[in-house]
Image (cartoon, rainbow, N blue to C red):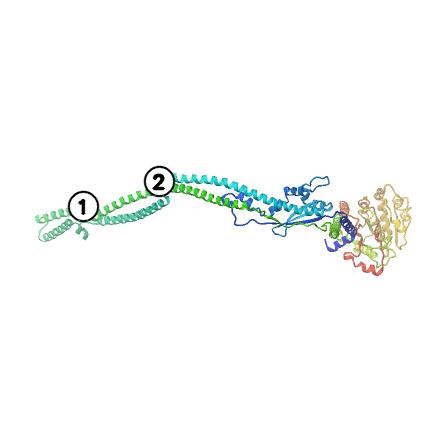
Amino acid sequence: MELARLWEVIRSRKWVIIQALTVVTLVSVIGSYLITPSYQASSKILIKKAQKGGFDLGRVGLSGLSSIITTSGDIEIHKVLAASRPYIEEMVSRVQLRDEDGNLLKADQLTGAGLVSTIKRSMFPKPSIGISQYQQTDILQIRATSPDSEEAMMMANTLGEIMVDQNQTQMRAEYKSARIFLEDEMQKVKERYNTALLKITDFKKQEKTLDLNIETKLAAEKMAELLKEKEDNVIDLAQARAKLGRVKEHLAKQRPDFLSASTLQESPQIEILKKRLTELRLQLTQANTELTESHPQVRSLREQIHMAEAELNKEVAVYRSSAPELGALERQIASLEAHLKGVNEGIDKYFQAFGELPDKVFKQASLDMELNVTQQTYSSLLDSLYQIGMAEAITLSEIRVIEPAVKPLSPVSPNKAVNGALGLFLGLVFGFSLTLFMEYMDDTIRTAEDVKEFKPIALIGIVPEFDGRNIHSISGRDPNDPLYESYRRIRNYMTINEDQPISTLLITSPGPGEGKSTTVVNLGVSVAHEGKKVVILDLDLRRPSLHTYFDVPNDIGMADVLQERASADEAILSTRIEGLSVLPSGPPFTDAGGLIESNQMGRLLSHLKGRFDVVILDSAPLLVKSDALVLARYVDGSIMVLDRGRTTRRAVHESMEILSRAQIRPLGFILNRLPIEKGKYAYHQYYYGRYGGQLSRSEGRG
């Protein structure tokens, strides 16, 4: 909502704000003097925090019991305990707080929270008590309120004493419970320790072992030696097999004609046969030079050579299969393979032993862990039992009263000054809220901006609101008067389009009392002042009013003309304004709608258009009767009058819907009674001050 619009709303509904402000302020001030005074006393309680570094039952599996004891210094816990039913009821019993019937008060009656309870206790003071933390410290503040100042003091001090006593009693009970619990647990842990010790002894006897850790270490070292030995053996075996392959390859290349020096050295028989074969071949060569092939000596040499070659081949074959190096390598490989087999068997043996060790180690570790845990638990329980015994012997309350309550000398409520200021504030808030709510619920047209909602129909004129009484006509007013000027603007709008001049004009409104008749009169006066002949017709046959504006008789009028009991010339009456005539409605007629719909209406308007320059029709409201829909067929245009603060948006929407269904589009809207000092129309104030026009607040009513 714009500030200008907000200010207009406040100004127009200022009495709502004033009345709300007055009523609420008076109620708060008068109530402050009527309410019984209430006194408040307060005491302060110090809550000591639990000491750090004390025994911890949580580490031995007693976290539940530990939390009960070590968190007792929590200020939030004591705050809740102080406001609990047992504490409050004990305080009520000691102080003997009773109601009107003589019964002890209940805890809910003293600690009731919420807005309703607060207001109720403010208006009808009764004993109440509240507990709060004092300025984020370890101090609780007890506030007791009562109509009796001494009773308030006793309530605050008594509740503090109860907190001290209950805390000490509770701590002793907790320590005693903890001590009994620890003694029972120690007996159970002791039995578990003995059982674990027996299990370890039986395990060592069964497995025939003293220390599995040492045995495991020795087995691991032996296993590492065997694996290293296996690795070396595998390497040697591979090298021997590779060498054997090379020797066999070398021996395979030996031929009687091509023998290596090593072969000749290792086999003297082959060397002898080789030399003999060489000598025989030399002798054969010499014999061939001297003798023929058939000579007995030649044939003998050849036979000897053949026998020597056969024997040499035989020896070479024997050497290939039984060379000394070949045998040595084969024996070496066999030895390495046998050794590798033994190493693998040793490795398998230790692997099997290792497979059994984890189970033994795990079982022994479990037994050792169970023994250690029970031993540690027993030691912790023993230490905790000792500390609990010491704490139980010197138990002191964690709560201490550091500031007892004193008897209050003056009441805390009601605070007349604060209540008066609060009433003033609430009155303003309530007044403004009520004003804005009324404005929100108000569906009436209040500004020119509101008319823009009904586009495309435009706002063609605004009639201002002025002070004064019983002034309905602009006749005789200064042409510079704002009211006169507003109707001149409407008149000029009718003559803008020279190609389609408006000679017949219908004026209507959504409902009665919205200023249509006044608009008809003043628009007729404005057109007549332009030098034109104007006649205005009172077609609101059920509630005629135009004759009263001009103080003319209503004996003969529209009803007589439409029934052809009189002519138009007989019924038309001249007014004191030059060029302006009026045709009143005439005597009431039961079927006014039938007269409007008759053919005589069209003939009458045609006759009047030929006699006058402008004919202006005043019809019944659109939402009351359908006369305007019938008359709109005979005129050049129609205008709908809206009254500020009276015409509703809903009425305008319904009127526009009716016109739309009848395919009638008005020329525009006229907004009545708009304050001239508001919005963009404030410039009229200049003319108002200069020419001193005095117009009525009822101006524009019809």
In the image, residue 280 lies at what x, y percent? 11, 51
Disc 2 is placed on an element classified as: loop
337 with respect to 5 (left or right): left
Residue located beneath label 2 in the image: 208
> Up-down: is 670 above or below 94?
below
Mark 1 or mark 2: which comes first in sequence? 2
In the image, residue 361 lies at what x, y percent? 39, 42
**Residue 259 seen in render:** no
Tally the numbered discs: 2
| Residue sticking out furthest to the front | 393
349 with respect to 285 (left or right): right
In the image, residue 583 lies at what x, y percent? 88, 49
Which of the two residues, 382 or 139, is positioned nearer the viewer here?
Answer: 382
The label shown at residue 634 is: none
Hey, which quadrant is residue 107 in on the image? top right
151 with respect to 549 (left or right): left
The label shown at residue 318 is: 1
Q: Residues within 10 Å of mark 2 (few under 14, many from 20)?
A: few
| Residue sticking out furthest to the bottom | 690
Q: Residues within 10 Å of mark 1 (few under 14, many from 20)?
A: few
Q: Amino acid at mark 1?
A: Val
Q: CA distance from mark 1 to mark 2?
A: 62 Å
